[in-house]
Amino acid sequence: MSRYQKGLRVLTSINGQEGKSILKTLEAISPDMAKFVVEFPYGDIYSRPGLDIKTRELITIASLVTMGFAQKELKAHVRNALNAGCTKDQIKETIIQMCVYAGFPAALNGLMIAQEIFEQKEDSRSAKRKRRR
């Protein structure tokens, strides 16, 4: 299996159709960057043995919070973490831990972003339940 195929398998397993949509947008801007994103982080790193996807997503969230400027990526990885089976509490605790290393502003911003994603997920679930009725 190629790096790209392996990466795409991992990406779609945690990001589903939304991941494909983001990838399609990125391919329209830069096909090379889209390929790099699939092959390197997902094909080479996320697919390695030793850590499960949930742990990798929590580590990624921690890193993005400490950076303090990657809000779009943080939103995507909070979604990924939820899709991978992380709980809201695990995500919140990971972000709270970052106030020690990145400061309160970074952790507070991270919590606000996480809450936005939690609300979007809940709104989406509510809408699906209403459609089923």
Image (cartoon, rainbow, N blue to C red):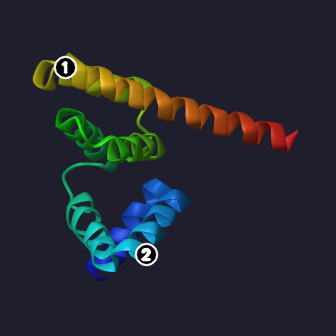
> Whole-Å distance between the Cαs marked 1 and 2?
37 Å
Q: Which percent across, then down, holds residue 99?
A: 19, 19
Q: Nearer the viewer, residue 42 or 70?
A: 70
Q: Residue at x 18, y 52 (%)?
A: 50
Circle 2 residues within 10 Å: few <14, some 14–19, many ≥20: few
Vertical order, 115 against 133 (above or below) = above
Q: Which percent across, then down, holds residue 48?
A: 21, 61
Q: According to the image, label 1 marks what residue? A: 99
- Locate residue 98: give its quadrant: top left
Q: Residue at x 23, y 20 (%)?
A: 105
Q: Quadrant of the N terminus?
A: bottom left
Circle 1 residues within 10 Å: few <14, some 14–19, many ≥20: some
Vertical order, 130 against 46 (above or below) = above
Query: Are the residues tagged 1 and 2 within 8 Å (C-beta)?
Result: no
Vertical order, 45 against 108 (above or below) = below
Amino acid type, residue under disc 2 in the picture:
Ala
Amino acid type, residue under disc 1 in the picture:
Cys
Name, please, the residue furthest toward the bottom.
2
Determine whether, in the image, residue 24 is placed left or right of residue 129. Answer: left
Determine whether, in the image, residue 110 is placed left or right of residue 131. Answer: left
Vertical order, 132 against 11 (above or below) = above
Q: Which percent across, then down, holds residue 75?
A: 40, 41
Element under disc 2: helix
- Locate residue 97: give its quadrant: top left
Element under disc 1: helix
Pick whichever of labels 1 and 2 is earlier in the sequence: 2
Q: Which mark is residue 28?
A: 2
- Locate residue 35: give its quadrant: bottom left
Name, please, the residue furthest toward the front.
29
Q: Which percent across, then down, holds residue 16?
A: 51, 59
